[in-house]
Every structure is written in structure tokens, then in C-alpha cells.
């Protein structure tokens, strides 16, 4: 099946009001048993995740307003996290996702508990915000729940990169982007460092901030 186009807040030079407004809407809960339409969303997520180099995709990033995301299920080495985040921020390539066989489908995900003493500052990239990286705070240790494809509740704990990934994708489903909470952001910088890139993304970020105020 053809992959879905990622909903982005900007292209190389221009910002998209329509896409921003869509991505900032809170998505709808999934009911069980799942309908054929929900199954189509899940298949589209899987097909897109397979073809695009990334760690996760929320349903609204491919145009569906439901509480579903696909994301890496395991990570062998936390040292790989930085390269994974840069992969998220990079422009799409012809290379298939190296993690295409490493995934879980998270339906109606939520965080049950966070460790307030575990806050970490780390890098993040996002398919919907191409070319830009941020350093921002996330909880390193969380307890979560979600539903699998059969409607079974899964409860587990996450740490490190997977915890950050879960929070990032859950934010998407709640209509929030990684740029939105300035109190948790220490730095923003282009993936490709240069004076021109800094000026370009500085202008795009400024326009974005004006739209969401």
C-alpha cells in the first residue's frame, strides 16, 4: 500500500496554518471492537512507518484524528538515541526504516504515573517539524497503559529513550508539539548548522509562535 504523507507545520520556507491547526486538535478515543476504518488507520501507520526512517508516528501526523500511534518497542543501546532523533528531524530519504520490524501499536495511550525526580534534558526531532532539533525536558521514568489491537489493556513501565518517545507521541495525540512548552525547552537548533539555517528556522519558529498565541 502507498505510504501516507506526513502532516508538517512547515516546508522549506513556508509555514502551514492549516496543518498547524489540525495537529493542535486533540484526537478521539478508539472504541472496541475496532472498525474497518480504525484497522485502515493502523495499516496506514504501519505502511508509513516501514518506509520512513523514524522512531514513531502518531495517527494525526498522517491525517487521522484518533488516539493511535506506532512506535519502537525496544532499543538495544541508549547511545543510539541521538542518531534516532536526528533521523526524525531529517528530510525523508529513500532508505527504509531500520526499525521497521521493531514496533508496537499503542491505542488510547495514557501515562498513569511519572517520577518527578527523573526529569532529563535531551534532544528531540519530529517528522512534522523537519530540519529542527530541540533540547527539552521529559520524564525519564513513567508508568503507562494502552490497548492492543484486540482491546486488551497493557500496563508497563518505560525509561530512557522509549519513555521520551511515548511522551512525544502522546503529546501529538493531545494536540501538542515539541515546540509548544517553552518552559521545558532549553535550546532549538537546525539539524544542519549554518548561519542561513539558523536565520531560516528562527523566522519559521517566530511565525509559529505568533500563530499559536
Image (spheres, grey):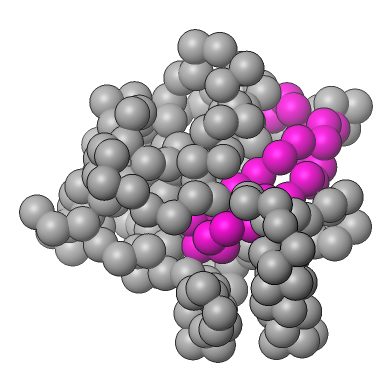
Q: Nearer the viewer, residue 152 or 104?
A: 104
The answer to which quarter of the image holds residue 37 is bottom left
In the displayed structure, 170 sits above or below 62; it is above
Q: Is residue 163 magenta?
A: no
Q: Quadrant of the N terminus?
A: bottom left
Rendered location of residue 180, percent (x, y) = 74, 65
Q: Nearer the viewer, residue 131 or 134?
A: 131
Furthest toward the front, the residue is 195
Is 29 placed left or right of 48 in the picture?
A: right
Residue at position x 30%, y 66% from top? 5
The answer to which quarter of the image holds residue 182 is bottom right
Q: Is residue 141 magenta?
A: yes
Q: Is residue 63 visible?
A: yes
In the displayed structure, 163 sits above or below 208; it is above
Rendered location of residue 53, percent (x, y) = 37, 41
Q: Nearer the viewer, residue 157 or 128?
A: 128
The answer to which quarter of the image holds residue 58 is bottom left
Furthest toward the top, the residue is 76
Residue at position x 45%, y 38% from top? 55
Residue at position x 74%, y 28% from top? 140
Rendered location of residue 44, percent (x, y) = 22, 54
| Magenta-tinted stretch | 119-145
Q: Is residue 110 visible?
A: no
How many marks are shown on the rendered structure? 0
In the displayed structure, 106 sits above or below 201; it is above
Rendered location of residue 178, percent (x, y) = 68, 57
Amino acid at each position: 500500500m502507498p505510504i501516507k504523507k506526513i502532516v508538517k507545520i512547515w516546508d522549506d520556507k513556508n509555514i502551514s496554518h492549516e496543518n498547524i491547526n489540525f495537529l493542535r486538535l486533540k484526537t478521539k478515543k478508539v472504541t472496541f471492537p475496532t472498525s474497518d476504518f480504525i484497522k485502515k488507520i493502523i495499516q496506514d501507520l504501519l505502511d508509513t512507518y516501514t518506509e520512513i526512517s523514524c522512531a514513531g508516528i502518531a495517527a494525526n501526523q498522517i491525517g487521522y484524528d484518533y488516539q493511535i500511534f506506532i512506535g519502537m518497542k525496544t532499543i538495544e543501546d541508549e547511545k543510539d538515541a541521538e542518531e534516532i532523533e536526528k533521523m526524525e528531524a531529517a528530510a525523508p530519504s529513500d532508505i527504509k526504516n531500520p526499525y521497521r520490524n521493531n514496533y508496537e501499536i499503542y491505542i488510547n495511550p495514557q501515562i498513569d504515573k511519572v517520577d518527578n525526580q527523573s526529569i532529563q534534558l535531551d534532544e528531540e526531532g519530529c517528522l512534522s517539524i523537519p530540519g529542527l532539533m530541540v533540547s527539552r525536558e521529559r520524564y525519564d521514568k513513567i508508568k503507562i497503559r494502552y490497548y492492543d489491537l484486540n482491546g486488551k489493556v497493557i500496563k508497563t513501565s518505560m525509561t530512557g529513550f522509549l519513555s521520551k518517545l511515548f511522551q512525544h507521541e502522546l503529546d501529538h495525540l493531545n494536540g501538542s508539539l515539541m515546540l509548544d512548552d517553552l518552559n521545558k525547552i532549553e535550546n532549538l537548533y537546525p539539524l544542519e548548522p549554518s548561519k542561513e539555517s539558523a536565520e531560516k528556522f528562527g523566522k519559521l519558529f517566530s511565525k509559529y509562535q505568533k500563530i499559536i498565541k
